[in-house]
């Protein structure tokens, strides 16, 4: 085994070691496959303001789960809990349990950097670096302690449905791409280290309809390899691309969480129906 392979093996194991130590004989392979992320009694505060209120839910593997709700309802805050991005906000406090593959990611012995190797993120605004396309994708590998190779760059760009459009200009600045291409470049950067989960915070809100459609089609392909959790204000988008939908309303409360078809066709709660039909929001 080469030194690079040893290094990658060690970095990949920083979180899986904890998973193995906490698993029990009662946990079956089937249940592990069904749920990849779970929250239990999750509360988030910014100083004294509560942004998430007692949220418990299980998110299945290799599905698209959409988080919808009006502005300020806590969707993005919840998303950031799943890879501990809220740790970077001084006034944020997280209570409760968030598990990845059975491990509480807020345990003291879980390294947030190792966690983010498992849980990648794509933000609302495309944010390529002022580097070449090649180096943009390579940065996603370098920051995770993985070796940058031509093969990995191509694989990530193909995975983001961008390779065919830019394969002959990898030395071009990522900033010179169109908005939709920049967002797919950011997706390539996020999937290059091969995470288990891809978090997306309104990834199409800044894009034109054609570019947004390409991202939606890409998500449909990505879910074959990754678990995708997406925040969206576009309810039609949630209905089109997601398998499960969680509806957050005022006060950071999770009001309903079910199969997407059930949420949009026959919701349990009147408030959810009112939101979906446009009576408020």
Image (cartoon, helix red, strand yellow):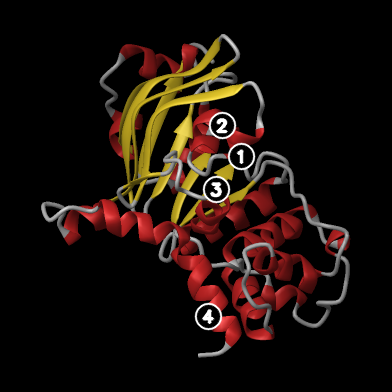
Q: Image quarter for residue 161?
A: bottom right
Q: Which residue is mark 1?
A: 202
Marks 2 and 3 close (CB-CB < 8 Å): no
Marks 2 and 1 close (CB-CB < 8 Å): yes
- Classify 147 as above or below 27: below
Lower position in the chain sequence, tag 1 or tag 4 = 4
Residues packed near mark 3 inside 10 Å, few (<14), some (14 to 19) or many (20 plus)? some
Q: Which residue is mark 2?
A: 76
Between tags 3 and 1, which lies in front? Answer: 3
Label 2 vs label 1: CA separation?
Answer: 9 Å
Lower position in the chain sequence, tag 3 or tag 4 = 4
Q: Residue at x 55, y 37 (%)?
A: 80
Camera-side residue of 234 and 78 = 78
Q: Position of residue 240 (x, y in %)?
A: 45, 45
Q: Which residue is mark 4?
A: 6
Marks 3 and 1 close (CB-CB < 8 Å): no
Q: Secondary structure at mark 4?
A: helix
Lower position in the chain sequence, tag 2 or tag 3 = 2
Q: Residue at x 23, y 53 (%)?
A: 23
Residues packed near mark 4 inside 10 Å, few (<14), some (14 to 19) or many (20 plus)? few
Q: Which residue is mark 3?
A: 112
Residues packed near mark 2 inside 10 Å, few (<14), some (14 to 19) or many (20 plus)? many
Label 3 vs label 4: CA separation?
Answer: 21 Å
Camera-side residue of 113 and 257 = 113
């Amino acid at each position: 085994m080469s030194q690079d392979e040893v290094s990658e093996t060690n970095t990949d194991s920083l979180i899986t070691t904890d998973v193995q130590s906490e698993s029990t004989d009662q946990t079956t392979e089937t249940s592990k496959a069904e749920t990849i992320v779970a929250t239990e009694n999750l509360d988030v505060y910014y100083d004294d303001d509560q942004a998430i209120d007692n949220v418990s839910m299980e998110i299945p593997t290799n599905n698209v789960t959409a988080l919808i709700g009006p502005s300020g309802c806590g969707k993005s805050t919840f998303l950031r809990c799943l890879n501990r991005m809220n740790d970077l906000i001084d006034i944020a406090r997280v209570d409760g349990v968030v598990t990845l593959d059975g491990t509480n990611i807020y345990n003291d012995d879980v390294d947030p950097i190792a966690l983010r190797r498992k849980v990648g993120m794509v933000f609302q605004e495309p944010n390529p670096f002022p580097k070449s396309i090649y180096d943009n994708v390579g940065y996603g590998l370098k920051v995770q302690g993985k070796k940058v190779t031509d093969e990995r760059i191509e694989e990530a760009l193909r995975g983001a449905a961008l390779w065919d459009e830019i394969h002959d200009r990898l030395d071009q600045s990522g900033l010179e791409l169109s908005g939709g291409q920049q967002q797919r470049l950011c997706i390539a950067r996020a999937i290059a280290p091969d995470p288990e989960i891809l978090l997306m915070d309104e990834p199409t809100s800044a894009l034109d309809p054609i570019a947004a459609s390409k991202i939606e089609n890409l998500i449909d392909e990505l879910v074959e390899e990754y678990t995708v959790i997406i925040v969206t204000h576009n309810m039609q988008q949630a209905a089109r691309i997601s398998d499960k939908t969680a509806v957050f309303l005022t006060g950071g409360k999770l009001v309903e969480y079910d199969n997407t078809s059930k949420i949009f066709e026959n919701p349990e709660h009147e408030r959810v129906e009112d939101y979906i039909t446009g009576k408020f929001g």
